[in-house]
Image: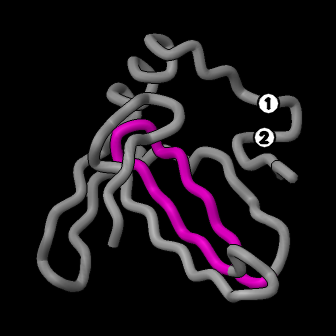
Amino acid sequence: MINRVCPFCGSDQYQYKYWAEEYWGIVEQHGYCDRCGYTIEQAYSAAIDGFMPDIKRGFKDFNGHYHPKNTRKRARIRRKYHIKKPDNGWYFNMF
């Protein structure tokens, strides 16, 4: 796991992993920012990135870790960093 800076909110808790091949370059990449919800996914195809939907109700995962709702936190961060919702939804394709 490589921690880098989130391209949207600048958080240092942006989790990013990638795999590259000699001829093709980056062939697989996965990234997620828990602060603003930005995510990028690619597995031997074009990269798809966007923002994950907000958690409207808290839940406990299989490890017993509780994940609280984050609608207010994400709304505040989107206002602060001027993140606008694209016309085709929160997920958008970037080539």
Judged by its main secondary structure, the magenta piece is: strand
**Secondary structure of residue under mark 2:** loop
State which quarter of the image contains the N terminus. bottom left
Question: Which of these two is toward me, 72 or 15?
Answer: 15
Q: Residue 45, image x and y in percent? A: 83, 77
Dot label at residue 86? 1
Q: Is residue 35 left or right of residue 86?
A: left
Give neighbour class at mark 2: few <14, some 14-19, many 20+ (Cα, 10 Å).
few
Image point (39%, 31%), residue name: 10
> Is residue 81 shown above or below 55?
above
Using the rendered view, name the quadrant where residue 26 is placed: bottom right
Residue 75 versus residue 26: which sits nearer the camera?
A: 26
Q: Which residues are magenta?
A: 28-44
> Is residue 74 left or right of 60 when viewed as pictured?
right
Q: At 41% from the left edge and 22% from the top edge, which residue is drawn?
A: 77
Q: Image quadrant of residue 69?
A: top left
The residue at the far left in this view is: 64
Residue 66 in the image, given as x and y percentages of width and height: 16, 63
Q: Residue at x 21, y 69 (%)?
A: 60
Q: Amino acid at mark 1?
A: Pro
Residue tagged 2? 89
